[in-house]
Image: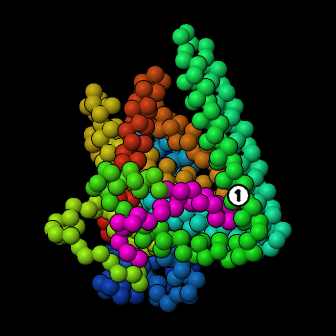
Amino acid sequence: MTAADLEAGAADSAASFIRPRKKPFNHKGEPCKNCGTPLEGWYCYSCGQNADTHHRSILHLIWEAIEGMFHLDGRLANTLPLLFFRPGKLAKDYMEGRIVRHVPPFRTFLVALLLFIFAAEHAIHGIRHEQELKEEKEAQALMTPQGRKTKADEIRKEATTDRAERLKSAVEERDEDLKEEGADQAKIADEYADDVKKAEGRYAKAVAKADALQSNPNAGKEALDRLHNRYANAAEQIRGLDFQDPEKIEAGANKIAEAQIAGQHFNVVVPDKNAPAAAGHAAPEPAAGGHEAKAKQWWPKDGLAKAVANPDYYLLVMFGWAHRLAVLLLPIIGLSLALVYVNKRQYFIYDHLLVATNLLSFSFLVNAIGMVLPMSAWPMAFGIVSLWTPINLFQTLRGGYGSSIIGALLKTFIVWMISVTSFGVLLTGLMLFSLSQM
């Protein structure tokens, strides 16, 4: 008995724990319902159709749906441990034709990608939900005098710390300037006095804001109103921005104020007087050549406004296209492997694509596992993933291609940099493309 026979037997034994045992075959000699050939076993030897009656329970149908999608047979138990811990052996098995004992690589890739997208959606919605709950809770706290006092004290404390840091920085900068030969002491003194004035002004403004908050009985209601309307308000402000005129861009940037709502910081753009009028107000007459000006507008601006106004729909559009763009990583990584192994003629593009599917399957699966963990575990989980992924790539190149340690390290660095850069470019393109589809 060979090692392959032992592995196949072990895989079938493992599969028996998760699949129900088949009933004894008692339809021998009956015609196959598909082609009429006399049956000798559970599967017709002529057309391959199953010989059972196909009358199954709901649980059986659910299991068949899961098994059909993820192909949960004995090969999965043989493939996953190698994918995670011995990727070089798995790559070598595929490249040398030992494939029947493993799950088809492209099927593993598609399932891993599907799980990754589901996990990413879950993580993003979970983050947004927790953030919204936190903001609502802090805004509710502002409805009580004690809550307003606590928030005001927090603002005062932050203002005191900020003033101390700015004054310390101003003193250090002044002392450094005075050490220079021929330093203009009068100019340095004026600059120091200006820095002190700005620091004191920021402090006074923050204290005044804290005092106003503490004495405002409607602070909680106003904070809730701003939270509930912030997406619509931000979208309206984005529509009013002019990305073509540098002077208006600078003027708009100068009007960006940092607002603190229920303990959270938001970038709020104060509407320009030349911006389109809000609903319910008369809009100015369009200037001559309005169609041409409209054509010159920055194309994602309206999509950006819609995405800000309705982030859930934007995420839906983005994830709808994510799996399509993720497939582009396959040829990119495959070609990067062909590049670093261009001198090894025994490997073909097909072999490199097989290895690329394994690398991406591993990456998608470990990141999906990390994203379904509690957020408190994310720093440790993604720290492990960020180290494990290049190590997995190194093991693949070392075991699958037979590279030396130095050669595998160099090739790992090249392929890793190409992969990370490509992922960043595709992610940026996905976000911009999703904006154009809004």
- For label 1, the residue is 208
Q: Quadrant of residue 308?
A: bottom left
Against 303, residue 334 (above or below) is: above
Q: Is residue 62 left or right of residue 262?
A: left
- From this viewpoint, which residue is outermost toward the front? 186
**Residue that appears at 34% across and 55% down:** 248
Percent across and percent down for residue 422 are 36, 45
Judge from the rendering whether residue 348 lies leftward or rightward of residue 239; answer left or right: left
Residue at 65% from the left image edge and 31% from the top image edge: 169
Q: Position of residue 138 (x, y in %)?
A: 72, 67
User: Looking at the image, which residue is at 49% across and 49% down?
Assistant: 363
Label 1 CA crowd tier, 10 Å (few <14, some 14–19, many 20+) = some
- Relative to 214, say whether 384 is above or below: above
Check the image and name the residue furthest to the right: 146
Whether residue 363 is situated above or below residue 183 in the rendered picture: below
Q: Does residue 5 appear in this view?
A: no
Element at label 1: helix
Which quadrant is home to the C terminus?
bottom left
| Closer to the camera in the image, 135 or 125 | 135
Residue 214 visible in rendering: yes
Q: Position of residue 222 (x, y in %)?
A: 65, 74
The amino acid type of the residue labelled 1 equals Ala
Q: Nearer the viewer, residue 421 or 345?
A: 421
In this rendered view, identify the residue nearer to me: 262 or 209: 209
Q: Give the range drawn in magenta.
A: 256-278
Residue 199, how many percent across, how many down? 65, 41
